[in-house]
Image (cartoon, rainbow, N blue to C red):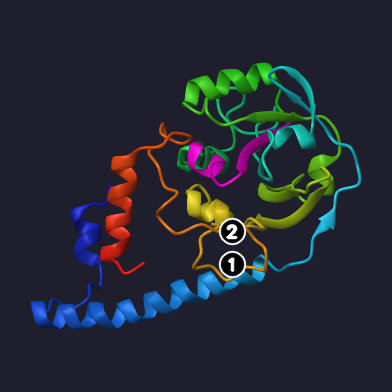
Amino acid sequence: MISNEQTAAMKKPPVVSAEQWQKAWEEMLVKEKAHTRSRDALAAERRRMPWLAVEKDYVFEGAQGKVSLLDLFEGRRQLVLYRAFYDSDVYGWPDHACVGCSLGADQVSHLSHLHARNTTLAYASRGSQENIARLKQRMGWERIPWYTITDDFDKDFGVDQWHGHNVFFRDENDKIFRTYFINNRGDEVMGSVWNYLDVTPLGRQEDWEDSPEGYPQTPRYKWWRWHDAYGSEDAGLTKTIEKGMELLNL
């Protein structure tokens, strides 16, 4: 809670008229749009980064027993795998995971939207499945697939000392490739559908994106659904979306 004394001590910006405020906002908007375009360009470069083949067979423990890295994809093409710190040497154990990792888990949006873009999000820790199940229920994270690391996966992928998101792609022959990695500053903003998709090799898969030839793309907005309506056709919803796209000249 910020006290009255603290707000009184703040060096605040000037108070201006509505016209002056509008002008200042429009000037800032130009910079914000430039930042958005720059972020899109960075994501386009990311989609053209080289890939690293995953040659080792990694084993995780899941709710139903031992699983491979390939199993973590759940049949989809892309996997974003977050290494969360939940282990006996983490403060708060066993009731809580790392504070930062927990804040990140609280930010995770509904996974159905990622699944609609052929992308799986999963968490992995050193904690046992018994403890992970109890933690997920306690904190309301039941939707997040959460696995136990059993080998050198964390060391091999740069997440043995610090949290991070590793991004993988599964090709038509079930060969797995590491395509990107995010840790430290930048990792804290992950949680929205768009942040996850922007770090994947396929991106948002919308037709405005600058992607390599042959990459899957569909019209923006048109694939969006309520999170419980993917896989079903709704003529009214489709018509509403198409009308909105028409009004926006999309």
From the image, which quarter does the C terminus lie in? bottom left
On the image, the x and y values in percent for residue 159 come to 74, 47
Label 2 sits on a secondary structure element that is loop
Residue 84 on the magenta span: no
Tell me which segment is drawn in magenta: 112-126
Marks 2/1: CA–CA distance: 7 Å
Residue occupied by mark 2: 203
On the image, the x and y values in percent for residue 81 come to 67, 43
On the image, the x and y values in percent for residue 39 come to 52, 70
Q: Amino acid at mark 1?
A: Ala
Q: Outermost residue toward the left? A: 17
Tell me which residue sits at (46%, 41%) in the image: 109
- Circle 1 crowding by C-alpha within 10 Å: few under 14, some 14–19, many from 20: many
Tell me which residue sits at (21%, 57%) in the image: 5
Task: Report how many numbered discs are placed on residues in the image.
Answer: 2
Image quadrant assignment for residue 160: top right
On the image, the x and y values in percent for residue 87 come to 69, 30
Image quadrant assignment for residue 73: top right
In this view, the mark in front (2 or 1): 2
Tell me which residue sits at (66%, 65%) in the image: 47
Cβ atoms at labels 2 and 1 below 8 Å apart: yes
